[in-house]
Image: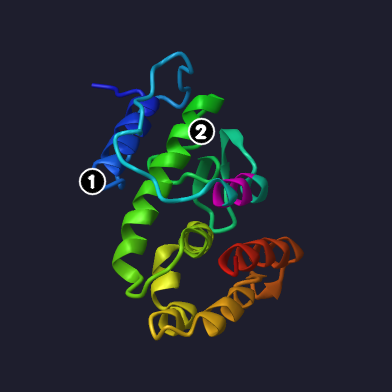
């Protein structure tokens, strides 16, 4: 029995909003029918502010056809990874749903990692960083360690540490980290 990849992405988004696992893979056709409906993810309250979403959208850009990221993984939309296969396509509203679902998952993880009070801008800057570098990297970071010791200034200075790609300073990441740091410092 063949399953449409958009159906897999739809289920992935739904599972993400309900706190489920997003590691499903589809072994199906590569073309996604953009007319299929994607569920709403408004059931849960998001704490990520618009400034964070704007940084992500500007930095990631939107791609409606699957593409390979720097790590060799297939991505789609604003950098969504789970369930994506070569040749998949989505439409703009589907990219928005996938972004919201990914952000909800990161927000949930962030609530578990951050042990000290943070304002909405600080929280959103951390979500933005985690979206880009991965929550595993954030979990092991000096930034998080300093933040959880209530060293907000030290944590803020750590954003610039995450400016390299393939071992070299990347101008795009320097700009992105500056925006995230600025948001964190508000």
For the N terminus, the image quarter is top left
The picture quadrant where one finds residue 135 is: bottom left
Q: Which residues are magenta?
A: 52-57
State which quadrant residue 65 falls in.
Answer: top right
Numbered disc total: 2
Q: Please rate how many residues cluster around mark 1, counting C-alpha atoms within 10 Å: few if below 14, some from 14 to 19, many from 20.
A: few
Q: Position of residue 144 (x, y in %)?
A: 43, 77
Q: Position of residue 129 (x, y in %)?
A: 53, 63
| Label 2 packing within 10 angstroms: few (<14), some (14-19), many (20+) | many
| x and y, in percent, of residue 59 in the image | 65, 51
Front residue (pair 131, 179): 179
Q: Are marks 2 and 1 in contact (CB under 8 Å)?
A: no
**Residue displayed at 39% across by 55% down:** 106
Residue 16 lies within the magenta run: no
According to the image, label 2 marks what residue? 95
- Whether residue 62 is visible to the viewer of this picture, yes or no, is yes
Q: Left of 169 or right of it: where is 106? A: left
* Residue 90 is at least partly visible in this image: no
Q: Nearer the viewer, residue 112 or 33?
A: 112
Q: Is residue 5 above or below residue 105?
A: above
> Residue at 61% of width from left, 36% of height from top?
63
Relative to 91, is 169 on the left or the right? Answer: right
């Amino acid at each position: 029995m063949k399953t449409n990849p958009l159906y897999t992405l739809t289920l992935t988004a739904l599972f993400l909003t309900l706190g489920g696992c997003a590691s499903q893979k589809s072994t199906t056709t590569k073309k996604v029918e953009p007319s299929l409906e994607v569920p709403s993810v408004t059931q849960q309250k998001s704490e990520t502010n618009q400034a964070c979403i704007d940084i992500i959208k500007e930095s990631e850009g939107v791609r409606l056809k699957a593409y390979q990221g720097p790590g060799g993984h297939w991505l789609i939309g604003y950098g969504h990874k789970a369930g994506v296969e070569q040749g998949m396509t989505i439409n703009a509203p589907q990219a928005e749903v996938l972004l919201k679902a990914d952000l909800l998952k990161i927000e949930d993880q962030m609530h578990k990692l951050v042990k000290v009070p943070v304002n909405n801008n600080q929280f959103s800057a951390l979500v933005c960083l985690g979206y880009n570098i991965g929550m595993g990297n954030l979990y092991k970071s000096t930034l998080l360690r300093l933040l959880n010791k209530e060293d907000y200034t030290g944590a803020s200075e750590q954003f610039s540490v995450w400016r390299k790609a393939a071992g070299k300073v990347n101008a795009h990441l320097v700009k992105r980290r500056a925006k995230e740091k600025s948001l964190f410092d508000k």
